[in-house]
């Protein structure tokens, strides 16, 4: 089972993949400014207890900071405390997704060492430019578990130079929402083929709202996007 933990909310747009960010989209619907970053009341969620122990039970995957970016500079004042919460729950698997991997060293706790064993860091790359900018650095870092996410996939990406044996998985998906940019199945297959050659697990998570296959463009309703990707049957484990 997996859970969400959003210690803070809000973000700053950073690269091409952020253009139609769902945090801004959803906040916009309730006239809230997503660029005003704030600490959430659920900041200490992983440490909260119920009658039979921690509310988040041992062994669960905790998707961390999905309504922001864990390495956002505005959150520097809160991150040390967030790391200490992560350290206090070694029985959970904290999954952190970031575009700001270049801020890694300035954002670490003193006792990071070779990486907390209960933390996976997944770097997002939406196009070749961002892959080339982020992944060589990512590969050099002391992180116990590393993954790559290409979502929203905006163009063809050659990931083959970056699929070293310590990349534990690659996830690919299109963009959702009314203004979604096109995701082409050929781009998905290019990444899948690179993963196959490197022996890296691959997941095609969802098609996005505007999906092109064999040159034909399809509008895919939100509820169908993950199902259509699954039907493609191209995941590698
Ligand atoms: S980094 Fe993530 S949360 Fe922040 S604006 Fe970009 S897409 Fe949104």
Image: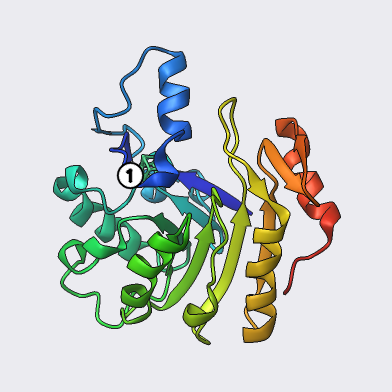
Side of 148 where 81 appears, left or right: left
Residue at x-position 38% and y-position 69%: 132
Name the residue tied to disc 1: 44
Considering every residue shown, the one lying at the far front of the view is 215
Q: Considering only vertical position in the picture, is 162 above or below 208?
A: below
Does residue 48 appear in this view? no
Q: Residue at x 49, y 45 (%)?
A: 4
* Of residues 107 and 188, the one drawn nearer to the viewer in this rendering: 188
Where on the picture, by quarter, is residue 181?
top right
158 shown above or below 130: below
164 above or below 204? below
The quadrant in which the N terminus is found is bottom right
Q: What element carries label 1?
A: loop
Question: In the image, is 102 to the left or to the right of 232?
Answer: left
Snapshot quadrant of residue 86: bottom left
Q: Which of 197 and 129 is in front in this view?
A: 129
Counting from the top left corner in percent of width and height, residue 105 is at 19, 69
> Residue 140 vs residue 117: left or right?
left
Q: Nearer the viewer, residue 170 or 180?
A: 180
State the image coordinates of residue 167 (x, y, percent, origin top left): 51, 78
Give the number of marks: 1
Look at the image and tell me whether residue 130 can be seen: yes
Q: Where does the C terminus fall, quadrant-wise?
A: bottom right
The image position of residue 39, as x and y in percent, is 26, 35
In the foreground, 2 or 154 = 154
Residue at image position (67%, 85%) is: 197
């Amino acid at each position: 089972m997996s859970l969400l933990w959003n210690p803070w909310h809000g973000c700053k747009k950073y690269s091409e993949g952020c253009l139609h960010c769902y945090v801004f989209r959803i906040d916009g619907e309730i006239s809230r400014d997503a660029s005003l970053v704030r600490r959430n009341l659920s900041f200490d969620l992983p440490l909260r207890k119920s009658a039979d122990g921690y509310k988040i039970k041992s062994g669960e995957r905790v998707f961390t900071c999905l309504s922001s970016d864990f390495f956002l500079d505005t959150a520097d004042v809160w991150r040390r405390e967030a790391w200490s919460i992560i350290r206090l729950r070694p029985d959970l698997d904290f999954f952190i997704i970031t575009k700001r991997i270049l801020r890694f060293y300035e954002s670490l706790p003193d006792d990071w060492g070779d990486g907390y064993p209960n933390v996976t860091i997944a770097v997002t790359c939406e196009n070749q430019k961002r892959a080339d900018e982020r992944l060589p650095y990512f590969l050099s870092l002391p992180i116990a578990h590393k993954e790559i996410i290409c979502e929203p996939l905006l163009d063809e990406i050659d990931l083959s130079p970056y699929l070293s044996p310590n990349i534990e998985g690659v996830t690919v998906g299109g963009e959702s929402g009314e203004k979604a940019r096109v995701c082409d199945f050929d781009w998905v297959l290019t990444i899948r083929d690179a993963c196959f050659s490197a022996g890296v697990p691959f997941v095609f998570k969802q098609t996005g709202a505007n999906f092109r296959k064999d040159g034909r463009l399809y509008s895919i309703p939100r509820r169908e996007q993950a199902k259509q990707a699954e039907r493609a049957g191209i995941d590698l484990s």
